[in-house]
Amino acid sequence: MVFSRLFRNHNSPDPPSTGKRLRADSFADALGLELKGVVSQAVLRELESREQHYLSSILDKSHFLIDGIVITPLDKQASESLEGFLQVHSEIDPEFRNHFFRSILESEYRSARGSTVVVAEDFLPSIQLTDQSFEQPTQDETFQISLRGRRLQFHAQVALKGPVAKEHSRISSSETTSDGVNGTPGLTGARRTSPSETRGAGLILSIHDAQGQRTLELRSPILIGREPPSEAELEGLQFVSLHGRYVSRRHLVVMNILEDTYFFLHDAATLSCLSSGSQLLRPSTIYSMPRHSEAELIFGMTAETRNQAADADPADFPRVTLGRALGRRTTPSSATPRPGTV
Amino acid sequence: MQLRYATSLNQGAEGHLGFDAFHAAPHDKLFVLSDGANGTPLGGDFAQELVRQLALVQEHPWPEVFREGFFVDEDARSPIPKGLGAYLYHLGLKIEAHLKESAATVSLAMLENESVRLLGVGDSYAGIFLRQPQTGWRRVHWLARHKDSQGNPSQLIGAPVPIEPHCFQTNLTGDVCVVLATDGAGDFLSEADFTQTLGLIGGEAPSPEDLNFLTQSLCERALRNGSDDDISLCLIWRRS
């Protein structure tokens, strides 16, 4: 039996006598079987009361989850047996209680109609002692119970939640791509994001320099420059190496503050940048990136060369386009503004 | 006529923002969903008040205007929606008098035995799906939305801009499902998400629990698809 094995696994390394061991095994098996049966019945009872509210097509694509199981000993003897059993073995193995209760739960319960209850791996039932748990059955009661057959020692009450859609019932995204019809109202252009995009807000840098083009997704703050500084010098900044003729060793700092992105020339920068709108960045000035749009920066541009910006060779004047990575907002501030005054 | 509905409101991970509000007046077959502008100080409160006001049909005669003053086709512009727009504009200003500088969208559905009416202001969603025995559920119409070039709503109730609601009315019998959704849900769901989810109903009559499961499933899908806004969605099923 499972419980015998469990019992052995969590017992002391110094085995007791065989007779005592067999009695203990027998008790553990009987207790486990009783609890398993009581819990199973309670789960199915609750499942059947719930499933009747749902279409079978929904039950096929979903499962219920266990929200809670409370086991109540029905008399004093059952309470003492269970508590004594758990206490003795918990002294030997502090994890015994968890292992034992986990072992009385199935990973899944299924009703006759086909609906299922899934049990989370780390879920554990709780024991609740009521007034009934301290009552001693009279001799007459014990006699009557014995006559009827199996004596019920425990009662279980189960709370379910759900149903929730099964993961494998997810509709493939490939079937739901945009049809891209211009002006069509509705959801045909639903935006899709990759898991990496949803992990957190950050910055997307599209770089075109002497080494070609690449796109990076990074968390702010970022230092862009020619040579990576030492770890101590970085002080939490992520360094992005830019390859080009007119790039300072430490050139530009980019950072997100709440929902806004700011950039400025590093103190040590000897060269500037030309930003979108032909603005030449000035030292000690903080610039903000427009929301919902990108900022393109051409590194190394000067007042003299800015007129050739459109034709500038990225190997000399690298281009970096800053954009916000799609991510979970931590505040509602990026959000919907009130349309302006007429 | 059988009419059932379920709604999932302000779903989302990591402490959703709670700017969406819903109110139903089932006796009047009227359902209102609103998304408070979260760039405004009291957008959530505004949405709450707006849906409550719009669903108070006993106190506001406007649903009659809504019923009678409807045009059938969005292209068939008529003076009536302007009257409706003026009504909503002034209602918005009335609420805004207490909830300063705040505003909200509205998506509204009214379902009669043989007709469905939709009204929308802002960037929330309202759509109609119809079940056909041969082909299953298919979209009948998505209401146009008010969006500017930046992707923000160009009209909101409570904003000092002229309100010209998008309206749609159609006569439909059989099994119909109306979807009201805020952009936190609608921007992250596709039409196929809806048709396939509604496919679970098939030709059966869903219970409120079924509809609740479907709204939850759609909200969870929007969340998995990357929604970082309040996710709110209402499904209204009607059989006639």
Image (cartoon, coloured by chain):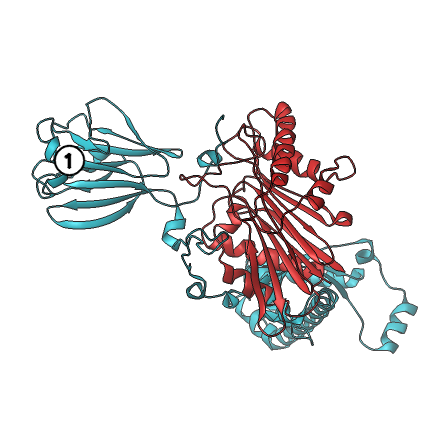
Chain colours: A cyan, B red
The residue carrying mark 1 is A299
Q: Is A159 or B109 nearer to us in this picture? A: B109
Number of numbered callouts drawn: 1
Q: Which residue is at a point 85% across and 61% down the rendered structure image?
A: A136
Q: Secondary structure at mark 1?
A: strand
> What is the x, y in percent for residue A333?
46, 33
Judging from the image, mark 1 belongs to the subunit labelled A
Q: Quadrant of residue A238?
A: top left
> What is the x, y in percent for residue B64?
74, 42
Q: Is A307 or A149 nearer to us in this picture? A: A307
- Crowd rating for badge 1 (residues with CA inside 10 Å; few <14, some 14–19, many 20+): many
Q: Is A132 or A10 nearer to us in this picture? A: A132
Tell me, yes or no, if residue A70 can be seen here.
Answer: no
> What is the x, y in percent for residue B55?
71, 41
Q: Which three-letter amino acid code belongs to the residue tagged 1?
A: Phe
The quadrant of the picture occupied by the N terminus of chain B is bottom right
B96 sits to left or right of A37:
left
